[in-house]
Amino acid sequence: MSVVAPRKRLATVLGLALVLAVLVPGRAGAAPPVATKGPVGWDTYRSVSGLAQLRPGEQVKQFSSFDRTGNNDDGFNGTYSCLRHDDAGCVIAEAHTAGELSSIWFTYASNSIAAIGRITVELDGRTVLQGSAQDIVDGAKGAPFVWPLVGDAADTMGGAVIKVPMPFTSSMRITTENNPHFYHVAYRQFADATGVRTFDPNDRAADVIQRLRGYGIRDPKPAANGARTQDAGVSLAPGASMSVPLTGAGQIDQLALRLPQVVAAPAVYDDGRAYGQGGSSFTATISPANQGVRITRRYDGGIGNQRASVSVNGQQAGEWSGGAAVPNGGWVDQTIEVPASITAGKSSVQIANTFVSSAEDVNEFRYEIHSKVGNQWVRTDIMDVGPNHPSDEAVHGYRITGATWAGLRQFRYATSADQTAASDAVLDGLRLRIRFDGQTTVDAPVGEFFGSGLGKYASRTLMHSIDTTDNGAFTSWWPMPYARNAVVQLVNTSDVPVNGGSVSVTTARDGSVANGLAQGSLGYFHATQHRADTVTGQDWTFLTTQGRGLFYGVTTSMRGHIPPGPTHQMNFLEGDERMYPDGSATPVEYGTGSEDFYESGWYFQDARDGGVEGVPYAMPQAGLVSHENGADGCQYVCLGAYRLLLAEAVPFGNGVEFDIEHGDRSQMPANYSSTAYWYGQATPSLTASDVVDVADDASRTQHGYTATGETRTTLTSTFEGKGDRSPVTRQVAATTGAVQFTAQVEQDNQGLRLRRISDQANAFQRATVFIDGKRVGEWYQPLGNTYSRWLEDSFDVPASATAGRTSVQVRLEPVAGAPAWSGSRYSVFSQSPGTPAAD
């Protein structure tokens, strides 16, 4: 056994992509994805290998408390938080269709959502979840509502989440006892209920929970048969590049990059604990194939002469031994190497620390566990200590005796400014470019691609991670299919030479992906990055593209340009995200603030430690990675964050635009950079087939349009989102009886999408939809807006009602008791697999 000096670099060789496969549960029992829907329910997380499967047969929508006037009252007063009230309280979400409830987020007070009271989730007329909202996000309900499928204010720095996917076949309703103020509810909407089973709260989904608890450490995908790894060195002069070519149909399963010259970013917020006479213990996961184990501890060197003995499975393994106190405190990492004689063949170990001596006490903030397999150190666990990580502590069985302190600290590592600047330059200037079948679809700086655009910060997500220990890996687990070949390229666009690095590419041959890509059922992986100064009055665009695809998430680097003064320097966070798929004038997702989009709250606030803002945290699909303040290349305040949308991935059939404001109405100056992760192909799967213009008599006649109890008026108003300052004048009809028309469609259609422009001054419009006399569902719109009254919404018709037809008769019958049905124009789109573009 030996003690390794803090931050000593280790020369390593990559190529162990399969090492961690033994630690990942398999996919036993996973049902095959439903055609056009993608995985449903727990298969969302059991089928991560299939993220490239496109989903033309569904939509993703969101309810939220956004300010209907377009201003910033997104929940402060609860003005727009309840769709309506009933005997159970405040209805915040409701649907009358088949679908899946994918994600719920709240914030209320920065430390609690207890004031919301009881939450009730009803699916298909049955209550599947009910109880104190606070207890549920605390994990008190038990599996499957446990961390990290739920998270409270400590887990998210001010927010609260429920990420359990809950399918339903005909209806969904969520009610809170009291006004929740700020909330988002994301759900999938299906054209039919084929392959959908109502969520069963008694299914504990233990395999999914185990998989998710390994986020940022282990590949969430099952091990691929026949996987092989190619390794290459990375030494690049400025302007130089290197490539790893891949041939034959298959999929990239893992990318791992090591850059030993890149040092960890010095400024870190972390919470931890300390003990005097006593100690601490926890269980850590290791690889059974290990040839030894490393334990790395982060501690505050401001407490001098800390000593604690370390035992592993009851055997003495080493001693933590710190030197003299660092003036004013400072981060130090120390590593103990545990010999294979103690750890070989084991999948977990019990680590115990026992106080020996100290000038005050012994503190601990974070433990990183690496297993040595095949001469490579691979991270196999993280134990994050502190009051902001109660779930992480519980999962690891953490115990402490003789506790003397617990709280948050912000310190720096003893890294020179020159080292930091050179490292940041490499992470920003070394670009990852990947070409699949002749098309470059990935082009991003390596830092931001792997989760941190501001420096080597500890990014820990379900799909990628950054290990900040010495020579720790930058790792991606996004599945990347290709039909014939692929080229992974690193290009050094910085002024700093890259020396002694290495890259490892793990692939699996799979002939079926060639067929899927050719037929258009699979999309190519994309990472789309851009950086620029924000423009006053113009939203920042995460992604705008044509064709069909699935949007899965984004890593964002926000460099504020707000100097000290009366305006809060994080005020750029007062910006809402808006998603516009398929050219829709109305956003299908309209958020309540930037930190809310990243599923936090109140400027990423740690309410446990005096309301400190900008405190990083990590959950599988959302987190704040970094916070810089007037140092390390940041002029004022800079934040790095990520958001993944695995269950609520947004499908698009004919292009998408995803924007976010930078401050209220995009008034705050900043420099933004973002890398969007998505799958797609260049040709659309949604084809415009016909338009019925209710305001045009000739169009009405041409389509045999009839309406009972119709009143026609002229409306001048706006659409929500980016169009809420641009009035539109059109004629609109309100009907109390049936609306009927005939529309042309593509004969090879695989279903239809009906899109309506209407007046949403009256909420809860409902109409039963018939196609050629056959009932296909209910078009229900519970949203309303008396400010921006124009609405564009959609209803999907399954292929079973339309396949082989060249025209259909559409009949919309308003439901008794509902407001008059509004319509100004109906557009009819045909769903098709699309034909991939030629090379």
Image (cartoon, helix red, strand yellow):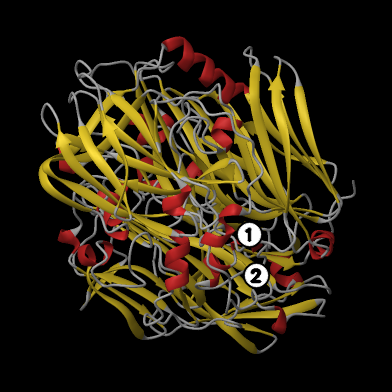
Residue 758 seen in this snapshot: no
Image x and y of residue 676, in percent: 58, 42
For label 1, the crowd category at 10 Å Cα-Cα, with few meaning under 14, some 14 to 19 and many 20 or more, is: many
232 on left or right of 28 = right
Residue on which disc 1 sits = 51
Residue 530, relative to residue 608: is it above or below?
above
Relative horizontal placement of residue 106, taking residue 290 as reference (left or right): left
Q: Residue at x 58, y 27 (%)?
A: 259
Q: Which mark is residue 57?
A: 2
The image shows a total of numbered marks equal to 2
SS assignment at label 1: loop
> Is residue 17 visible to us here?
yes
Q: Position of residue 132 (x, y in %)?
A: 20, 69
- Disc 2 is placed on an element classified as loop
733 left or right of 269 in image? right
For marks 2 and 1, give the one nearer the viewer. 1
Identify which residue is drawn at 28% across, 43% down: 310
Disc 2 residue crowd, few under 14, some 14–19, many 20+, Cα 10 Å: many
In the displayed structure, 295 sits above or below 550; it is above
| Of residues 634 and 2, the one drawn nearer to the viewer in this rendering | 2
Q: Amino acid at mark 1?
A: Leu
Q: Residue at x 33, y 37 (%)?
A: 297
Give coordinates of residue 492: x percent, y percent. 69, 21
Q: Quadrant of the N terminus?
A: top left
Q: Is residue 188 above or below residue 730?
A: below
Q: Amino acid at mark 2?
A: Gly
Question: Which circle's residue, 2 or 1, is located before the other in the chain?
Answer: 1
Q: Nearer the viewer, residue 813 or 327?
A: 327
Q: Nearer the viewer, residue 611 or 655?
A: 611
> In the picture, residue 367 is in which quadrant?
top left
Q: Quadrant of residue 375?
A: top right
Mark 2 to mark 1: distance in Å?
A: 15 Å
